[in-house]
Amino acid sequence: MNDIWWRDRAVCVGKDPTLWEIPHGHGKVNRTQSRRHTARIEKAKAYCRSCPVIAECLIEAMKIDSMMLKVHGSGKQLTSETIMAGLTPRERKKLRQST
């Protein structure tokens, strides 16, 4: 069995993939835009929390982040600005550092 068998069971399948993208400039916008960005991020996280394959997604997210760190170096920001397994890139970074 390949290691991506779980993807077809993910809650995000068939949904707009841009929902999981972190808006560029998040945190550097006016309050109204910031509220919209935050609401969108929370909606994506809510989908993830209800997903039956969230654990498999987290493993995949950590693999992707690890590969990106090897390519771009630990001092650079990850280029994958997506929510995976209900976590933002910054939250996954904290998780990596705590383990």
Image: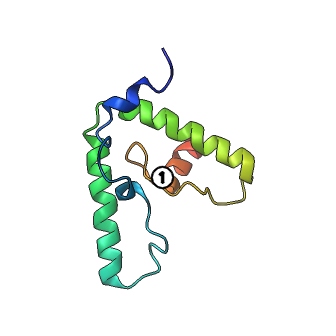
Q: Which of 36 and 19 lies nearest the eye of the viewer?
A: 19
- How far across and how far down the image is residue 40, in percent? 30, 63
In this image, 17 relative to 52: left or right?
right
Q: How many marks?
A: 1
In this view of the protein, which residue sits in the foreground, 67 or 7? 7
Check disc 1 and report its element: helix, strand or loop. helix
**Residue 23, placed above or below residue 12:** below
Residue farthest along the top direction in this orientation? 1
Question: Residue 55 in the image: x percent, y percent?
Answer: 40, 31
Within-10-Å neighbours for mark 1: few <14, some 14–19, many 20+ = few
Residue drawn at the location 29% of the way across and 31% of the way down: 52
Residue 33 visible in rendering: yes
Task: Where is residue 59? Give x, y as percent.
Answer: 50, 33
Which residue in the protein does label 1 denote?
Answer: 91
Residue nearest the viewer, comparing 13 with 76: 13
User: Can residue 99 be seen here?
Assistant: no
Q: Identify residue type, mark 1.
A: Glu
Q: Quadrant of residue 11?
A: top left
Q: Is residue 29 above or below residue 82?
A: below
The vertical placement of 68 against 40, above or below, is: above
At which x and y percent is residue 17?
38, 52
Residue drawn at 34 percent across, 57 percent down:
19
On-image quarter of the C terminus = top right
Task: Give the residue at x 49% y 71%.
Answer: 24
